[in-house]
């Protein structure tokens, strides 16, 4: 969780939603004695590819059983993401092809025929 919290703050700084000085302030335990209240960054795009450790001094080890477990986990994650990607790609293609019927009875804002309107603050997702 620590890495996700740090990443969230760095993302906010990069987006201009927080000043860069917030990092120094958060690292000052006298100024910030408790965990700051930031939403954690999503875990999926965070992946450690390498570290600055000298490989002569630090060697990463992985047992055969742990490798099998890791391979299975990565394969399951890959499958899940490929399915999600396919669903979103098809939804995007469907929208781009215009394969829907315009609802002119509500000015074109109707969602699913339920009467909800995009942007009305109701359950229509707007």
Image (cartoon, helix red, strand yellow):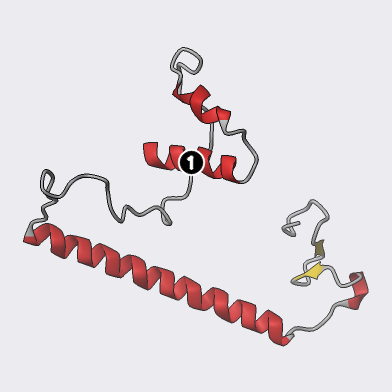
The residue depicted at 35 percent of the width and 54 percent of the height is 47
Q: Circle 1 sits on which residue?
A: 40
Looking at the rendered structure, the secondary structure element under dot 1 is loop
Q: Position of residue 13 (x, y in %)?
A: 58, 40
Q: Position of residue 5 (x, y in %)?
A: 45, 38
The residue depicted at 14 percent of the width and 51 percent of the height is 60
Image vertical order of residue 23 relative to residue 63, above or below: above
> Which residue is situated farthest in the left direction here?
64
Q: To which quarter of the image does residue 104 belong?
A: bottom right
The residue depicted at 51 percent of the width and 15 percent of the height is 31
Q: Position of residue 96 (x, y in %)?
A: 70, 82
Q: Position of residue 4 (x, y in %)?
A: 42, 42
Residue 21 appears left or right of 70: right
Q: To which quarter of the image does residue 125 belong?
A: bottom right
Quadrant where the C terminus is found in the figure: bottom right
Image vertical order of residue 126 relative to residue 79, above or below: above
Image vertical order of residue 4 relative to residue 48, above or below: above
The residue depicted at 11 percent of the width and 43 percent of the height is 57
């Amino acid at each position: 969780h620590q890495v996700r919290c740090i990443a969230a703050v760095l993302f906010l700084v990069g987006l201009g939603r927080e000043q860069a000085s917030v990092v120094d302030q958060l690292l000052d335990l006298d100024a910030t004695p408790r965990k700051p209240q930031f939403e954690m960054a999503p875990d999926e795009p965070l992946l450690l590819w390498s570290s600055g450790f000298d490989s002569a001094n630090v060697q990463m080890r992985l047992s055969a059983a742990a490798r099998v477990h890791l391979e299975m986990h990565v394969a399951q994650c890959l499958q899940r993401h490929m399915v999600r990607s396919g669903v979103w790609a098809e939804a995007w293609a469907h929208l781009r092809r215009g394969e829907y019927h315009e609802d002119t009875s509500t000015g074109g804002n109707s969602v699913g025929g339920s009467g909800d309107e995009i942007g009305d603050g109701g359950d229509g997702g707007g």
